[in-house]
Image (cartoon, rainbow, N blue to C red):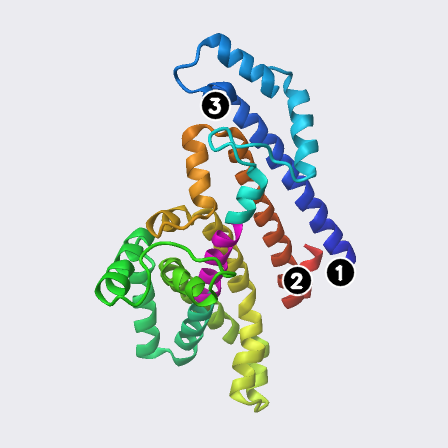
């Protein structure tokens, strides 16, 4: 297990370094410069050149990269070119918003999807056909359409939940939860349909295994056969799918954050790309990559615990 973890950690570090280098190269290949962004369209070429000189933009790329990476290791991701604020603290304040949405949506879609998929596989017949057909319809609904529908029903018509805005947990846990309900539901409904289809297929396959039929013949209680032995075998692809869903949600919350006016990473990423705010773009990419890398390592550990044979892969 120690060798397995060391191998996965080494791969994670190499992945992170590769993304950092690639991001740095892409940012420097974009037309424009930090001086032009900071001074605006009315600045002369001399003024832009002087500002770039001040920022170190005119230095060789290797020097700039070394300067940036040594500061990033110490937690200094630079200063926003448009807002003038420190990128690291700004992103750190927005990370809990995006993380809460992605984690909440993944947990809810996992709960609803696994229960629905297992029920469909075990009950079969009309229940199976209904869940399969319903999940097929739900999975095709666009996230933004669900978000707008939820706002109209739960906020405008019923007045149960706020349509927009975010309340920090430290200010009011109840209002924090209320501000996240609709964004999480917008993402979780479609995700639950995907998980349900995957869980159903995995459970049907697991129930057909030889050792499950042997255990059934020994007279083992049905609940133990289904929810301990069969579900354990069926859980590996479902867990892997949920992990990938979390990564995907973390990177695609920008739509939900726009609909519900939430101050998450998606908002700052969109603004940074639109305004060519290079330090903010690099900071967002680094944080998103860290989330992906950590999630993949956690998934590898969890899946290897469920199926020890995969540690040798």
Q: Nearer the viewer, mark 1 or mark 3?
A: 3
Q: Where is residue 13 drawn, in percent x and y?
A: 69, 43
Asked whether 123 or 243 is in front, the reply is 243
Q: Which residue corresponds to the image point at 64% horizontal and 54% vertical from the top-left? A: 297
Q: In this figure, which residue is indicated by the disc labeled 1? A: 1
**Residue furthest toward the top?**
46
The answer to whether residue 233 is above or below residue 169 is below
162 horizontally vs 3: left or right? left
Q: Where is residue 82 drawn, in percent x and y?
A: 46, 30
User: What whole-number distance in Å separates the C-alpha atoms at marks 2 and 1?
Assistant: 9 Å
Q: Which residues are magenta?
A: 95-109
Q: In this figure, which residue is indicated by the disc labeled 2? A: 304
Mark 3 or mark 2, which is nearer the start of the sequence? 3
The answer to whether residue 87 is above or below residue 29 is below
Q: Where is residue 295 drawn, in percent x and y?
A: 59, 54
Q: Which residue corresponds to the image point at 44% horizontal and 66% vertical from the top-left? A: 108
229 is within the stretch colored magenta: no
Q: Residues within 10 Å of mark 3 (few under 14, many from 20)?
A: many
263 horizontally vs 260: left or right? right
| Secondary element at tag 2 | helix
In contact (CB < 8 Å): disc 2 and disc 1: yes
User: What whole-number distance in Å separates the C-alpha atoms at marks 1 and 3?
Assistant: 51 Å
68 horizontally vs 160: left or right? right
Asked whether 52 or 122 is in front, the reply is 52
Q: In this figure, which residue is indicated by the disc labeled 3? A: 38
- The circle drawn on residue 258 is none
Asked whether 212 or 77 is in front, the reply is 77
98 is within the stretch colored magenta: yes
Q: Which residue corresponds to the image point at 48% horizontal and 52% vertical from the top-left? A: 98
Q: Is residue 257 visible?
A: yes
Mark 1 or mark 2, which is nearer the start of the sequence? 1
């Amino acid at each position: 297990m120690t060798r397995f973890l060391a191998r996965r950690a080494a791969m994670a570090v190499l992945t992170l370094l590769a993304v950092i280098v690639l991001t740095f190269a892409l940012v420097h290949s974009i037309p424009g410069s930090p001086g032009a962004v900071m001074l605006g369209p009315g600045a002369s070429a001399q003024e832009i050149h002087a500002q770039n000189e001040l920022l170190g933009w005119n230095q060789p790329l290797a020097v700039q990269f070394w300067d940036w990476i040594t500061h990033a290791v110490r937690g200094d991701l630079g200063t926003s070119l448009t807002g003038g604020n420190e990128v690291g603290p700004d992103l750190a304040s927005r990370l809990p918003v995006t993380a809460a949405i992605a984690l909440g949506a993944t947990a809810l879609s996992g709960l609803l999807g696994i229960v629905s998929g297992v029920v469909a596989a075990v009950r079969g017949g009309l229940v199976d056909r209904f869940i399969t057909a319903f999940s097929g319809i739900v999975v095709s609904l666009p996230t933004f359409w669900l978000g707008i529908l939820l706002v109209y029903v739960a906020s405008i018509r019923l007045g149960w939940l706020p349509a927009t805005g975010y309340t920090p947990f430290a200010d009011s846990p109840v209002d924090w939860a209320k501000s996240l309900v609709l964004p999480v539901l917008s993402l979780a409904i479609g995700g639950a349909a995907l998980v349900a289809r995957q869980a159903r297929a995995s459970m049907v396959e697991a129930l057909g295994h030889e050792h499950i039929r042997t255990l059934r013949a020994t007279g083992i209680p049905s609940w133990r056969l289904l929810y301990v032995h069969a579900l354990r075998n069926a859980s590996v692809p479902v867990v892997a799918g949920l992990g990938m869903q979390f990564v995907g949600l973390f990177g695609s919350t920008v739509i939900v954050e726009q609909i519900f006016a939430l101050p998450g990473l998606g908002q700052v990423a969109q603004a940074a790309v639109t305004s060519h705010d290079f330090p903010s773009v690099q900071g967002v990419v680094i944080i998103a990559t860290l989330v992906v890398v950590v999630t993949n390592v956690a998934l590898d550990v969890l899946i290897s615990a469920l199926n020890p044979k995969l540690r040798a892969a």
